[in-house]
Amino acid sequence: MTEARHTIAAALLVAILGLILYAIDPAFFVRDDFQLQYLPGSREVARAWTSGELPLLSRYSWVCAGLGAEYQFAIFSIFRALLDLLVWALPLSLTGRGAFLFLVHAAIAAAGAYRLARHYGAELGASYMVALVAGLNGWLLWWGTTWFPGIAGFAWLPWYWLGLRRAGFSPPPGRGGWAEARPTLGMAIALYLLVSAGWPYAVLMAMVVAAMHVLPALVRQQWRSALAMCLGSLIGLGLAAPAVLMLLEYFPYTARESVTTAMESIWFVPPAGFFGLVIPAFAATWDVFIGALPHPAVELLGAFVPLAALLAGARREFLRRYLPELVLLAVLAVLMLLPSAGPFRWSFRWLPLFHLVLAILGAVALEKRAAKFALAAIAVTAAAALAFDREPQATLLHAGIVAALCVIWLFAGNRFMPAAITAGMILLTFATFSKRGEVPVWRLDEALREPGVLDPGRRYLAMYDFDFTFAADAHGRFTRGLRAELRPGNLPMLAGVEFINGYSPLGPASLRDIFDIDVHGPMSSRRAETFLRYETRNHELLHQLGVDGLVVPEVMARRHANVLARNGWTPAARVAGALVLHREPLPAPVFQAAVALKIADQRQTYAAIFDRKTPQLPVVLFTPGNTQRYAHRRLLRVDEGRNHTEVRFAEQGAGTLLVFRRPWLPGWRATVDGKPVPVLRANMIMPAVEVPADASVVRLTYRPTSLVVGAAIAALSLIVLVVVAVKT
């Protein structure tokens, strides 16, 4: 019970320190991707669960329609689902909700890291230091507030590590059963929560930590321990199978799949940047998003005390005992110096694990002379700042303050000073650099939770480009977001307004090809001009998509005013330098095509859409065949839900082609009068079904094979989990 109280205290310590940071800068905890992607996605997930629907799809974006397949929205994590429901039930501001989501996970990471440090034998004060480093290290503070799944996944890594370590130890004499099964069960649950949280790098970190435990156990022929580790890990992966398998099925059809896998040399830690392990204010030249620029090493915040303790206590016996952890630390340091590629690009993302490993080693190595090594490290770093630091004033000022704290440490001892100095450095670095960053930040007004001038019953296409919502600083870094009123990214999800646009690092490749939409949601001005000139009439592409609202920069709208007016588009409102245009009537959720071109080649399919000679667009089906004509039949009723559409015909008649005005994704299935039929791709971006003569009911349902298989694996894993708990 004493350890349980200290665990709660460690979590509360991080939460309270986080609240102090929030009081200093409330906007800090919700930035860039968190603002435009994850916070609105959290709202959409909560909205789905509240209405009793599985949040596989979003109603409010085509680019980010596949919430389940996108992985980072973590719809298969029970914890994330409950937290999403809770945070949107509380009376908080938008920034308050984001800070709440962040700090809950920071507290979970801190609690797990505290328990892990205690299991390693660290003293109480040193364990609190480990908790602070795990929950509020510099990478999590400056990038977990941007890439929220980063901290959501990492939060469970200390708990998984703890389960692995416990599985390597036999229970005390006379204690079998539950005592023996508990590490396996805890490990499985922690890994499930980690994998389903939606951050691939956290999964990779878990694999590395697992290898650090399993391989030595196999070398020492500790078969029982190795088996327990593998069993717990397999159960955890099995529980998270739906999340992983849906991503794998979706990925080949996304814009990310076609991105080159060439090595990227941005965001790795430069050699001079490692002085930031001592004083994070040290500004070396980093390769950031737009090139080589001075960058304070804020991502390395939290490493100072553990590094000094490790240098002081690294004797031969220590090196022998903790060889696996030391090897892992060295490997991580090398990885952070190297370029990276693919979904695991930007190698500084290894930093959270680096911080945790270093903190654990520093906690167990901590001894009296660590304060002397800390003062020596500050002296070396201050000297290096005079030679290499691009902004030495801040570094020298911080070095003086930290040196004063270390003098107190020298006389006060190790009881609580390591944690106190770590907390002080977090506050000092945050107060100095919280306003600086490499990512844009928008001012999120509470009015964004309401539709405002937009009509929730319409489907909009935003036609502004990247520069319309991003502002660059003197160095060319995009550090300020503009015109949040235009709802860039996934912000329409907050108010329940539907846009074709959206923010997704994946997104269907066909939508990118059709609209030339950026990852963040803007549309290229060149493609917008094409649409305004050629695709705004009835029976053209926007009409087929069901788009009856446009958000167009005023300059562009005036340039095409005559065409838009002639085609029935009228100004409905003006917002943030753009016109909101509406047209009537509102399209139905489905339409029947009179003629379709069947083309099996993707390039020819796009050519048939954009290079056609006639104003009207025949539906282009991405399938082998020839031009085909279809009849038209009267519809009795169309019922559209989040994950399905059902169409009932009013009468019998000839065969028809039914096109559904919703985004195509792998996983759509269709039945006609209960019998399965193929789902085709209309214009590359909509599902379509050829309906035979005299059919009565057509049902389109989103049920990917990966979901069915993943759910079966998860159910089997849950049964195994229960059996292990009951039998042992």
Image: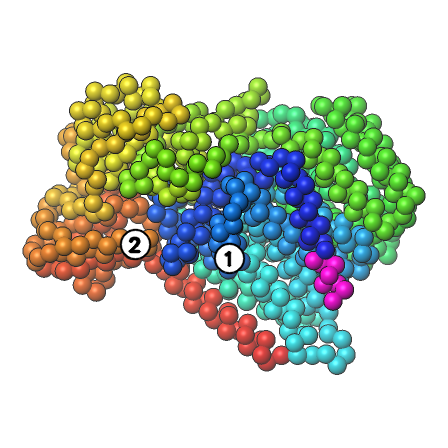
User: Marks 1 and 2: CB-CB under 8 Å?
Assistant: no
Tell me residue 279's x, y (percent).
76, 34
Q: Is residue 59 visible?
A: yes
Q: Is residue 103 above or below residue 478?
A: below
Residue at which label 1 appears = 82
Secondary structure state at the residue bearing disc 1: helix
Dominant secondary structure of the residues highlighted in magenta in the image = helix
Viewer-nearest residue: 366 or 11? 11
Indicate the amino acid at tag 1. Answer: Leu
Q: Residue at x 17, y 36 (%)?
A: 539
| Nearer-the-camera pick, 565 or 273 | 565
- Mark 1 packing: few (<14 Cα in 10 Å), some, or many (20+)? few
Residue located farthest toward the front when viewing the structure as drawn = 91
Q: Which residues are magenta?
A: 1-8
In this rendering, the count of numbered labels is 2
Q: Amino acid at mark 2?
A: Gly
Q: In x, y percent, where is residue 595?
A: 13, 43
Question: Which residue is tagged 2?
Answer: 641
Label 2: which secondary element: loop
Q: Quadrant of residue 516?
A: top left
Asked whether 574 or 32 is in front, the reply is: 574
- Say if 284 sits above or below 602 in the image: above
Residue at the extreme right of the image, as rendered: 411
**Label number found at residue 175:** none
463 vs 285, left or right, is left
State the residue in front, 287 or 615.
Answer: 615
**Residue at 21%, 40% in the rendered image:** 586
Please state, as top left, top right, bottom left or bottom right, where the C terminus lies in the image. bottom right
Mark nearer the N terminus (1 vs 2)? 1
Q: Return the x and y of residue 216 as percentages of the image width and height.
A: 71, 62
User: Percent x, y for residue 649?
Assistant: 13, 56
**Gap between marks 1 and 2, in whole Å?**
23 Å
